[in-house]
Amino acid sequence: MPSLSAIARRHTDLDAADIAWLQLIQADWQVIADLSFADLVLWLPARDGTGFWAGDQMRPTTGPTAYVDDIVGTHLPRGRRPLVDTAYEVGRIAREGDPEWRDEVPVRVEAIPVRREGRVIAVISRNTNLLGVRTPSLLEINYLQAASDLANMIALGLFPSEGQRSDHADSPRVGDGFLRVDADGRVVFASPNGLSVYRKLGLTGDLTGHLLADLTRELVPPKRRPDEETLSAVLGGRAHRDTELGSGGGPGDDVSLIVRAIPLRPKGEHIGGIILLRDVTDLRRRDRELITKDATIREIHHRVKNNLQTVAALLRLQARRIGSPEAVAALEEAVRRVGSIAIVHETLSQAVEESVAFDDIADRLTRLVTDVGSTTAQVQVRREGSFGVLDSEVATPLAMVVMELMQNAAEHGFEAGASGRITLHAQRHGAVLEVTVADDGRGLPEGFDLDNATSLGLSIVRTLVESELGGHLTLGRGRDGGTRAGISIPVE
């Protein structure tokens, strides 16, 4: 489905500022539709003057829809909907006319001109399915009155407010809790859900008649509410903003609310505002649990890293006490393998999620190999390409594989005292990661067969690649001599 900005650029003469104004209306699109119990369609004037293009639509959650199909991106010729033509040309809300019939459903249509800086730049049609209309309750009367006030503000160019945006992804909806305050910030109507929200804060009586900001100060401790300026502006209905507040402090009585205010100025003067409330106590509790869980996981990785470093230190200590060169070499290999795993856990202990940017790990491994190679050959190790971000389940075995392959190349690919180069190359092809470790050393011995190799290092690599990573390992002569090891593994 095309976006509002794409439709406007393709079919209209609206400039960037006009489109931004319409996008601000979109931010409150659902609120207006729910208060109206009606479908909203935003009609944009065609560049060639032939009619209008549907830039966006919104169905209500408070009543039946008048549009079964999506109409965004469709063209409305002039004369097809006379009320839309009239609202655009005259610049006033057009309500006259008999109901339209759509799929055997009577629909009442109103057309609201969208004014910006004295110009009508679009028209909003409000389409009410009359099959769902009944004698309105007090709640519905207040919804409709608020919707009428907002429609008048749109027609006068007083809504939306410049720069307004919801500060919360979980901003309140009309059904979560609805209050209406007068110009002094006194509650003149509270929906049952709105009253229930304040009961959770500790209110025992009714909301109607209270100055909402003063009442909230009594119920909410200072540390759980915003600054005084924000509190007065939002709860007084004078600022189009969101804020969050709460009460209690113990694990059983802590309450968190998001409060959203929409000022009302249907004739230019401030007459009060709409206050929307949402109880987000459960959401905030889950957020805290996730934060605690993430912190616990990072602490576990930190402790695993420390334990692995302790194991490596014990192995080094044991190696110094053994007289057999073969045993010393075996312990040193074990130390390096443990160290490669420790690097992954150290990186994960500093990460927010259970995934890591593997390039940093690969660079640290290449430095370790350079240090190892300096005792036997003058080896330069460099990385090319990028591994990208990998899950911890992939990063840990891959670190051991990369370390093992580079270590084997440094220790066995060159004569003692010789100089050489090892290249670690990584590239992702869709859902497959291709990694090669190539050197310019003396190459594999004659008659080498990977399937019959007895090297412990190659056995470890092959097991990790094929069993742990579900990939494939190849080992052969490089294009320019030396040895080339390649692995291909699936990644998300």
Image (cartoon, grey):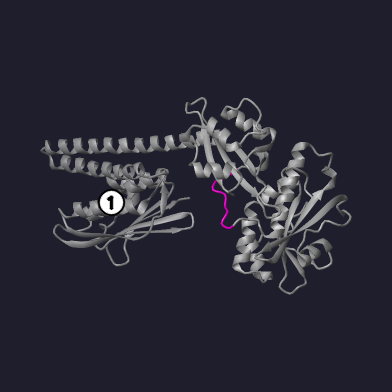
> In the rendered view of the protein, which quadrant contains the N terminus?
bottom right
- Asked where in the image residue 26 lies, by quadrant, the reply is bottom right
Q: Mark 1: which amino acid?
A: Leu
Depth order, front residue of 329/394:
394
* In-image side of 454 versus 30 (left or right): left
Residue 320 visible in this rendered orientation of the protein: yes
Q: Main secondary structure of the magenta part?
A: loop
Residue 85 at x, y percent in the picture: 80, 65
Residue 168 belongs to the span the image colors magenta: yes
Residue 368 at x, y percent in the picture: 23, 51
Magenta stretch: give its range: 162-171
Say few, some or many: other residues with alpha carbon within 10 Å of mark 1 (under 14 / 14 to 19 / 20 or more).
many
- Asked where in the image residue 197 lies, by quadrant, the reply is top right
Residue 441 visible in this rendered orientation of the protein: no
Depth order, front residue of 426/279:
279
Q: Mark 1 points at which residue?
A: 365
**Eyeballing the image, is 187 above or below 417?**
above
User: Residue placed at 31% from the left, 35% from the top?
Assistant: 303
